[in-house]
Image: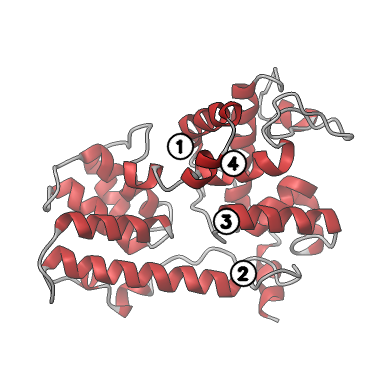
Amino acid sequence: MSCRSRALPCRLAAIVTIAAACCSLALADPAADKGQDQGKAAALRQEAVQYEHGDGVARDAQKAAQLYCEAARLGDMIAQYNLGLMYADGRGLPRDETTAAWFFTMAAKQGDALAARMLRQVGEPGEKPPECLFDAEGQDIVSEAAPEQQKIMALVRQLAPQYGVYPRLAFAIIRAESNFNPGAVSTKNAQGLMQLIPETSERFKVQKPFDPEQNIRGGLAYLRWLLAYFEGDVALVAAAYNAGEGAVNRYHGVPPYAETRHYVQRIREIFKREEHPFDPAITEPSPELPKITARRLM
């Protein structure tokens, strides 16, 4: 059995660590939350390996896939790759290269060279995420929403994968920004569902900010850019969405504004993750990230 499938420490050393949330934020410790997620993901993946290979338990490919997928949602790169292999090779599951491509893409975006190589073999992922990812992304929020809000959520779930953004993060932003009101306007002239200011609308080519689809596309494009700029750090991304990336850079973390800190807390409470996959090809990372990371470690 390979080092990868046994999840040995030699493979874990290759996992790319995304910048952690700034320590200046007077909230729950993001490093502790991150550690909990990583620990949970590793435990899920190790259990999945046992079921995939029948190591001490009856072999059960479906159970393995379920566990791998849950670990993949928590950002475990090895689980993402292993589940991609199960679908690519038909290892106890129906062979499905489109689904395999989804998981290889997730791993490749975290720097997994083998996953990137497999992507060249299986092709591009489809527009709709695999069900095990799709069902978990905001289902609790959807079930509690009013019918009009559910229509907006359905549109988000359709569009978000095109931008590499988890629907739940978009739901969190929309709830905090406009509470799902397409006609919302702030005192600073932020407009629509995702409260795009005119400069942001122009930047991401949104001509009709009160059109739900255009507004969501603009907000998702901005989130995709912020995720790349702050290397998937959800606290920094949320702070930048509220106060601007310049303020985050200037303060080397979440700005000391009461409104922004409360906003970041709301996003974290809804999204429930400290990190998000990102596409490094979108933009160069913030030049202040090393200082932000150093401040966190002080």
Identify the residue position indicated by label 1 in the image.
Answer: 161
The mark found on residue 231 in the picture is: 3
**Residue occupying image coordinates x 70% and y 25%:** 182
Query: Which is nearer the N-term, disc 3 or disc 1?
Result: 1
Q: Amino acid at mark 4?
A: Phe
**Residue occupying image coordinates x 34% and y 72%:** 43
- Check the image and report above or below for 294 versus 70: below
Tell me the element at label 2.
Answer: helix
Tell me the element at label 4.
Answer: helix
Towards the viewer: 29 or 11? 29
Instruction: Specify whether 268 is left or right of 154.
Output: right
Q: Amino acid at mark 3?
A: Glu
- Mark 2, other Cα within 10 Å: few <14 / some 14–19 / many ≥20: many
Camera-near label (1 vs 4) is 4
Quarter of the figure with residue 283:
top right
Image location (x, y in percent) of residue 81: 29, 57
What scheme was used to colour the molecule?
A: secondary structure
Tell me the element at label 3.
Answer: loop
Instruction: Calculate the distance from the C-alpha at mark 1 to the C-alpha at mark 2.
Output: 26 Å
Instruction: Calculate the distance from the C-alpha at mark 3 to the C-alpha at mark 1.
Output: 18 Å
Residue 149 at least partly seen:
yes
Looking at the figure, which quarter contains the C terminus?
A: bottom right
Q: Amino acid at mark 1?
A: Pro
Q: How many marks?
A: 4
